[in-house]
Amino acid sequence: MFAKLKAELDSIMERDPAARSRLEVYFLYSGFRAVRSHRKASWFYRHNMKFIARWISQRCRHKTGIEIHPGATIGRGLFIDHGMGVVIGETTEIGDNCTIYQNVTLGGTGKDVGKRHPTLGNNVMVGSGAKVLGPFKVGDNARVAAGAVVLSEVPPNSTAVGVPARIVRVNGVRVGSLDQIHVADPVSQEICRLDYELFTLKNELNEMKAKLRSQESAEGKEETEQ
């Protein structure tokens, strides 16, 4: 037990340059506390004492701001950095030595049954604010960028960015072109399209009015001549 605890502490020390000692991690890191609490809750959940399991997980949520369903499967060395706002769903599976930052959601889409939440391989990093939604796999050594919304499988050794997320690197090689500064804004594009259509309709309406006035003027002249 102490060997496993030491390994968990050491894995956090290796990944967090702000950690100064194992004691600091043990007593002060909310992510470490949440994972330890989950280990207890998961034991009760697997032994069909689900009320106690949920009580432990909800108590931890109130104390740390991290909500991990006791049904989730978590491997060794999970590091939840900062942690506030992290949500991990019931059928989520997380491999070894993964890193998750604040405001991450490993959730479902609401349309699946049974396995509803994602599976993370080993050494996966999920950036702050990212949402991984659905019963698919994020492969070993994959990276999910901050703020990304992942709705489909992420291959091993790749990087996913954007909303919805797209794969931009595989095995360190860039996939296609990536320009996050000059990316077209779909909302602005739609507004421009509607503005152009409005401009066209106004011109057509003005032409119709001009023709109607011309016809009325011609008819008026004919009546005067008669």
Image (tube, grey):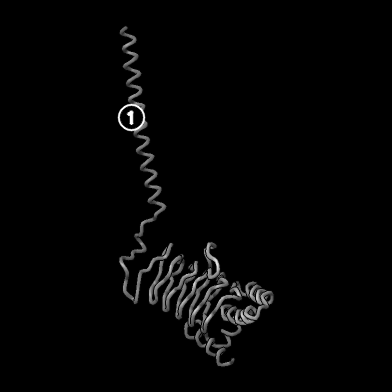
> For the residue labelled by badge 1, is the local secondary structure a helix, a strand or a loop?
helix
Q: Nearer the viewer, residue 99 or 75?
A: 75
* Residue 45 shown left or right of residue 187 in the figure: right
Q: Residue at x 37, y 68 (%)?
A: 167
Residue 163 picture location, percent across and down: 43, 62
Residue at 34%, 34% in the rendered image: 203
Q: Position of residue 13 (x, y in %)?
A: 50, 85
Report which residue position mark 1 lands on: 207
Compared across the picture, whether 53 is left or right of 184 comes to: right
Dividing the picture into quarters, in which one does residue 49 lie?
bottom right
Query: Which residue is situated farthest in the front direction here?
Result: 114
Question: Is residue 118 at all visible to an observer of this figure?
Answer: yes
Which residue type does callout 1 highlight? Glu
Residue plotted at (35% across, 23% down): 212
Indicate the quadrant containing the C terminus: top left, top right, bottom left or bottom right: top left
Rendered view: 223 above or below 33: above
Crowd band around label 1 with a 10 angstrom C-alpha radius: few (<14), some (14–19), many (20+)? few
Q: Give the position of the N terminus as an image quadrant.
A: bottom right
Give the vertical position of 171 relative to 13 (above or below). Answer: above
Residue 174 lies left or right of residue 130; in this view the side is: left
Residue 28 seen in the current view = no
Q: Quadrant of residue 33?
A: bottom right
Q: Quadrant of residue 206?
A: top left
Between 17 and 155, the one lying in front of the other is 155
Residue 117 x, y percent position in the rendering: 52, 70
Tally the numbered discs.
1
